[in-house]
Amino acid sequence: MRKRWLELSVGLMIVAGVSALIALALQVSGGNMSRNTQNYAITALFENAAGLGPKAKVTMAGVTVGEVVAVGIDPNALMAQVQMEIYGQVDYLSIDTSASILTSGLLGEKYVGLTVGAEDDVLVDGDVIEDTQSALVLEELIGQFLLNFGDNT
Amino acid sequence: MMLEGIIDIRNISFYRGDRAVFKNLNCTIAAGKITAIMGPSGSGKTTLLRLIGGQLKPSQGQVNLFGQDIALLSRKQLNHLRSRMGVLFQSGALFTDLSVFENVAFPLREHLNLSSEDLYNRVLLKLEAVGLRGARGLMPAQLSGGMARRVALARAVAIEPELILYDEPFAGQDPIAMAVLQRLIKHLNTQMRLTSVLVSHDIAEACAISDQVILLGEGRVLAQGSPAELQASDDPAVKQFIHGEADGVIPFHFAAPPLQEELKGLNHD
Amino acid sequence: MINFIADLGAVAVGKLVRIGEALLMLLQALVVRPKVSSFSRLIQQLYVVGVQSLIIMLVSALFIGMVLGLQGYTLLSAYGSEQAVGQMVALTLVRELSPVVAALLFAGRAGSALTAEIGLMKATEQLASLEMFGIDPLHRIVAPRFWAGMISLPLLVAIFSLVGIYGGHLVAVDWLGVYSGSYWGNMQQAVDFNEDVLNGMIKAFVFAFLISWTALYQGYSCTPTSQGISAATTRTVVYSSLAILGFDFILTALMFGGTV
């Protein structure tokens, strides 16, 4: 009798633990477990990539389609080079897609937003996005505002 | 079959740190008899028992058990040898999470391949021999000290060994329990044709049932012989122990300077 | 002065010797062919070590989750970002608090119990009895308890995280009015299974190993008197706790140090 309860409770604990792990996987982490299959890499050059770092989201129409892998300098173009990994299923980014660095929410997390263009051909592994919009830097904004303000008075 | 059950201890020395517990100790334990190992506290009685059981290894010398030097045995061989002997520990050492029945059944399950019917009957018989067949469903925590010891005894003899070692079986027992244990030890030794070695300092009880007494002291054997021989001995060390004298070869006072020098308020400068 | 340094050296060497002994004990206990009979001993120990720790884990997780929800809400509302409280609670728990707090509680509850139990078995000569019956106490007593610890703690950590997150939900959504959808939605965006949940579980396994090993060694090697057992139990809790916190830092630096 006592043995029955013992085995039962151990079984319950194991079931509870494993279900907790599954729940954590699905409910808590959104279940993005395997992103390795057939993802491809594209690069974009920006004048200013301030605040963008690895693991930042790459979105299109607000939906995450990839992530930033690395941010470095392109020595030839002397611009910021952002390497991104795009999910394999996302195979409809036209070659004239534009990329902008945007700010998410008030806490200022930077991410890359893609806007698809009109061309038929799509971006494949190794392609470079040329049409880019840099990050907004606060000082430049203030400078611009003051300039406009100065013009109007 | 029983004639080989001798323990032969040759020239053993055993050190605990820097202290020599034994130095060139020699003794033989005869088969089929009850031998008592006695001596004052700290003389190494329990250590000797552990050396015999193979739990400790001597720094020098040989401990021969059933004709084999136990220091040379592999783990497997030692375990096999241990299945031929039973040990009764001072505290009984029953397994606290097993019932009385399961405790006695334990060595049977481990060493023998009995049918569950045979096992059941064996356990009952052993418990009957120690008078505790009715207590088989109890847990060790529910037993008195004396009862626990008797169950441990039943467990020690369960696989019918050739040799039994008792570590202070009479210590702290009430007179009835002592009488019961005495009777059991004697009875089992005769009935099962065992060799029994008991370590004790209850002189009267041990001498009453032993055939041989080995008196240890100062790291060696002080005297060896039948209880009657030791009682009649002239050796001062033997006399002090056997007759329970407070002062003698082993002094009453711990080493200290003279009393006059230590008392305060007296001018002795 | 020289004496002091010599003593220090002796202490250090002594500690190394102890660690070596502990390692030998562990190896001897674990290197064995598993038998069918040892499975039932494992189940028994899983009950003692795991199931009996459930209550303290559940209650602690609930309260910690609730406090995180409360504190998180208070801090984030200063920036108008209350909606992020879900991801804050989840990340804090999954990455750090669940493995560490659950491990500390486990060390105190199960670890000390293991040490005391084995120490008492040593003091009442039960371990010596087993040896005299030709049974290796390391295989029979120590090994099942070790595996029970290795299996239980990770399971308990997973449960801890989940209960904590629900605790946070209780406070943030039901009490303070955060929108339930944001609580879960933001969380799902921010928590990555491989990065966060799995790393937390790796920590749990490391801590389980440290606690089980320490508890069992301390019990097995203690002085078999009541003072000795009490000292050993204290050592288990202290050493386990220090090891948990130390390894937590190392693991966190390894796992999360690269990214910002």
Image (cartoon, coloured by chain):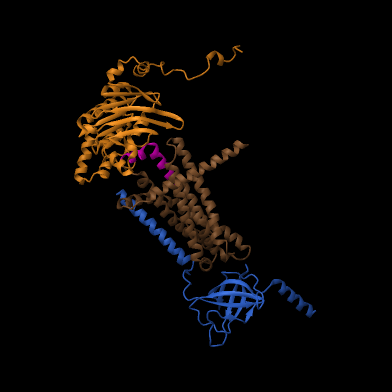
> Which residue occupies 26% across, 31% down?
B6
Q: Pick out the residue farthest to the right.
A: A153
Position of residue B235 measured from the top left corner of the image (x, y, whole percent): 35, 16
- Where the C terminus of chain B falls, by quadrant? top right
Residue at image point 43% right, 57% down: C155
Q: Colour of chain A?
A: blue
Q: Quarter-wise, where is residue A10 in the image?
A: bottom left
Q: Main secondary structure of the magenta part?
A: helix
Can residue B171 be seen here?
Answer: no
Relative horizontal placement of residue A138, taking residue C213 as reference (left or right):
right
Letter of the chain shown orange in the rendering: B
Q: Which residues are magenta?
A: C110-133
Viewer-proximal residue, B58 or B16? B58
| Quadrant of the image containing the N terminus of chain B | top left
- Which chain identifier belongs to the brown chain? C
In the figure, A146 relative to B225: above or below?
A: below
Q: Is residue B128 in sight in this rendering?
A: yes
| Residue A2 forms part of the magenta stretch | no
Q: Residue at x 21, y 45 (%)?
A: B114
Q: Position of residue B170 (x, y in %)?
A: 32, 27
Left or right of A131? Residue C153 is left
**Number of numbered labels in the structure image:** 0
The spot of residue C69 in percent (x, y) is 54, 59
